[in-house]
Amino acid sequence: MTLTGALSDYRREREARVLGVAVAAAGRAPALDERIAAAGLAGAPDSLDELDQVEVLSKDALPGRQSGLAFGGLVADGAEVVRVFASPGPIYEPQLAGSDPWRWVPALTAAGIGADDLVLNCFSYHLSPAGMMFDEACRALGALVVPAGVGMTEVQARVVADLGVTAFIGLPSYLSALCDTYRTAGLPESRWQLGKALLTAEPLPQPLRETLTATVAQVRMAYGTAEVGLIGFETDPDQGLRLGPDVFVELCDPETGRPGPPDQPGEVVVSVLHESYPLLRFGTGDVSRWMLVDGELRLAGVLGRVGAAVKVRGMFIHPHQAGEVLAALRSDGLVEGAFVVDRVDDVDVLHLEVVAADGSDPDQLVEVAERRCRDTLRVRPEVRVVPTLEDGTVLRDRRPG
């Protein structure tokens, strides 16, 4: 089996479901109707080639689209929405009714997590959907959940020991911090039962994976977004990501929006196979490439970004948000500033570099800047007062790759 052959088989296998969603949503989802008409199509596409004429809907475009229309017209009329989330942007995401609405169960199962597990869910339950995504998936499996969220690692380490937590869901860096906290707190090794972890939203470099698996036997990565849910997941380490069963994935040229050659990287463009949420040809802004594992088509993971937003510690920061924070800080004694994302010891870090006005109090400026960032971005940067900035860019990503 060649890569070209595997990709052709995948497209043929998913074609009927993708087109069926487009037909079922016709006239019910204003955003999809608008995009189909803009592509010059008379109605729902009748082939994937026609679907690929529809312009990719970028993540960066969602805040503007949603400002005048509920959910940006992406949710079909009559769909039952049970929760609404507000991710940075702001981007408003619906939770549809039903079990495991973001379809993460296959990823949890591949990580060995099941009904007998007590899961420490270390994604935020506040406004953004990540915590609830995995909570719903665990409940669908029958697993018991500790809704831990982010922070208070000392308390969480005690919970692991006292309750016999067996599984973890969260960021790679947060699992590393939890393991370190457990050790430094002097908690008994005999009460550490945490043997499974599903990690996402950050890279997992090989050195960090090796460090984690020395303490947590089974570590698996998964990939998804707040809008889409599950896109791909590991079945074995370093074997790429198996594609989720309820999405259709293309790797597209960021300039043309059309699928590129099978052997070239491209933007991950996803169609959700759900008639109530016909999110077709959604551009994640992530870059990946295809790979074959024992004849199966898989994604090689996230290799970079093409969109304007950057992701740090599982949260997106948009340039306009960075600009809003800096504009607000100018009245607090800031001359100019810039957000900088870097990677230190395999962990993503966010800095806010600021140039203080003459006569201003640097310590007070740092305190105010931290508060404004926490309120606007929901990510707390390390604020550094510097004499000058590199250039006028308000959001800079220095991470390798």
Image (cartoon, grey):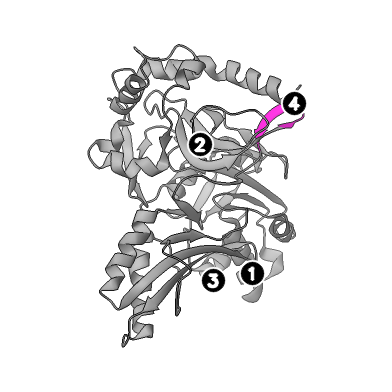
Question: In the displayed image of the protein, which residue is found farthest to the left?
Answer: 68
Distance, label 1 to label 2, CA atoms, is: 40 Å
Judged from the image, the secondary structure of the residue bearing numbered disc 3 is: helix
Q: Mark 1 points at which residue?
A: 180
Distance, label 4 to label 3, CA atoms, is: 45 Å
Q: Mark 4 points at which residue?
A: 295
Foreground label between 4 and 3: 4
Give the extent of the magenta segment.
292-299
From the viewer's side, name the closer residue of 89 and 400.
400
Disc number placed over residue 154 in the picture, else none: 3
What is the magenta segment's predominant secondary structure?
Answer: strand
Q: Mark 2 points at which residue?
A: 254
Judged from the image, the secondary structure of the residue bearing numbered disc 1 is: helix
Q: What residue type is labelled 3?
A: Glu
Judged from the image, the secondary structure of the residue bearing numbered disc 4 is: loop
Going from the N terminus, do you reach mark 1 or mark 2 first? 1
Q: What residue type is labelled 2?
A: Pro
Going from the N terminus, do you reach mark 3 or mark 2 first? 3
Residue 348 included in the magenta stretch of the image? no
